[in-house]
Image (cartoon, grey):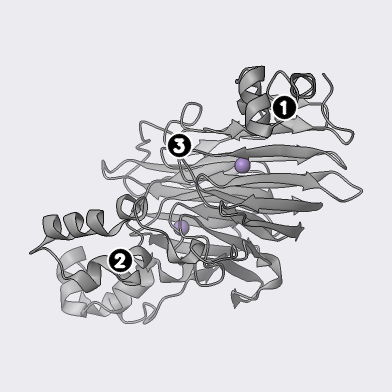
Amino acid sequence: MSDPHRREFLTAAAGIATLATLSGPQQAAAGDPSFMNNVPDPALAEKELPTFKFALEQSTGKVIGGSFGKEATVTQLPISKGIAGVSMKLEPGAMRELHWHATAAEWAFVLEGRVRTTVIDPQGASETNDFDPGDVWYFPRGHGHMLQCLGDRPCHFILIFDNGYFSEFGTFSITDWIGHTPKPLLAKNFGLPEQAFDSFPKDEVYFARGKIPPEKPSVPLQGWKPPAQTHKYRLLSQKPIATFAGGREWRVDSSRFPISKTVTGVILDLDPGALRTLHWHPNADEWQYVIDGQVSVTLFGSHGRFRTEHLAKGDVGYIPQGYGHSIENVGTTKARILIGFNSGTYESIDLTQWIAGNPVDVLATNFGQTAELVEKFPHRDVFVAPKDGPGK
Ligand code: MN
Ligand code: MN
C-alpha cells in the first residue's frame, strides 16, 4: 500500500483501532482473509519463498496405544495458513471420542481399513456411516462427531481442515467438558444423581478404547433421525472425472457432495514422468498429501521467486491461493496424490489454456518471438502432460 493510500485507510479506520494494530504483523497473523487480500502476508513477503513441504508421516504427533494423530498446522508448516491436515490411525476397538471443532470443518479420505462415524447437526438430526478405503466424509464446522475403527484391523485416514490454525489437539472433547463441569451442574443438566458422574474421566480421553463395535450400527438413543444431506461420498467408487495420457483425476466438490461447502477433494494419479502442468487456483489454497510415489512440486511466487520441493510418500505440500505451481512424477512407479482445496467450488487456470486463449500477435509481442514459434504452443488446455510432453 502506498503512503497516501495508507493514510486514507488509517483515517477511515480512526477510532476503531490504533496504528500499531492495523499495520503490525499481528493483524495478518490473525488470518482475516479480507484484510490479508490487501496486505502482504509476512510469511510470503520475504526475498525467497518459504518451504512448502512437511514430512507428516515422519513426525510423531499424539500416540495412545496403537493409535496416533499427526498434524500439519501453521506450527509445523508456517505457510499453510488456510488448511491444516492430520494423518490418523486407529487400532481395533479405538474411537476418536465425541468432539467438535470451533474453528474448522473436517473433510476426510480413508486410506486403509474401515471407519464408522456419527455426527449431529443443529437440527438434531444424526447420521451414522461406515467408510471403506476411497470414501470421503465432511463435517461442517462445529458439528459434533466421533470416528471409530471397524473390524479387527487398524484403519488409517487423512483429515483436512479448512483453517491452517486449527489443531486437532485443541478440539472440544466430550470428556474434557464433562470432566471439568461441577457435578451438581451435571446432575441438574442430565437429571441424574451426582454420584453417577463419580467414575467419569477427569480429563480428555481423546482416543477411547473398548470392544470392537458391532458390524451393524446400533440405534441412537433418540432413534434414527437422518439429516437432509448425507456426510458420506464414495470418491474412488466413481469413474475418474477425467482421464489423460499420463494420468487420471477423481474430484468431489459441493456440486456432487452438497454438504461439502468449504472443501473440494481430489485424487490425482500420475504415471512415471507425467506432469500436472503449470496452473493456479483463483479461489482456494491447495493442500497435498502423497499417498504413493515421488513427486517434484514447483511454486512460483512473483518477484522472480521460484521454489521446488521433492515430496515422497507421507509428505505434505501447500500452495497458497493464486500461486503458480506444478506436480511431476519423478519416480519410477505410479504416483497418487490426495489434494484438498478450501473451497466447495473447484477453479483452476492452466498456463497452456491461458496461452491458447490469446492470439498469436499478442503472444509474439509479449515473448519477443516469431509468430511461427508461438503457433507451436498447444492450442488447447493440457491438464496433464505425459512423460514426453503433450501431443498436438
Ligand atoms: Mn474431528
Ligand atoms: Mn493445483
Residue 11 percent across, percent down from the top left: 12, 59
Mark 1 burial class by Cα count in 10 Å: few <14, some 14-19, many 20+: many
Task: State the CA–CA distance, disc 3 to disc 1.
Answer: 24 Å
Q: Nearer the viewer, residue 350 or 242?
A: 350
Q: Indicate which disc, 3 or 1, sits on the residue closer to the N terminus.
A: 3
Q: What residue type is labelled 3?
A: Gly
- 162 shown above or below 97: above
Helix, strand or loop for disc 1: loop
Q: How crowded is mark 3: few (under 14 residues within 10 Å), some or many (20 or more)?
A: many
Q: Where is mark 2, residue-wise? A: 27
Q: Tell me if 38 is positioned left or right of 338 in this view.
A: left
Q: Which disc is residue 382 wearing?
A: 1
From mark 3 to mark 2, how far is it between C-alphas?
A: 26 Å
Q: Residue 338: horizontal and vertical position, in percent?
A: 66, 46
Percent x, y of residue 169:
46, 71
Looking at the rendered structure, which numbered label has been put on residue 66? none
Query: Where is 40 relative to 375, above or below?
Result: below
Is disc 1's CB within 8 Å of ligand 2? no
Q: Residue at x 45, y 38 (%)?
A: 260
Q: Earlier in the sequence, mark 1 or mark 2?
A: 2
Judged left or right of residue 255, residue 3 is left
Residue under label 3: 344
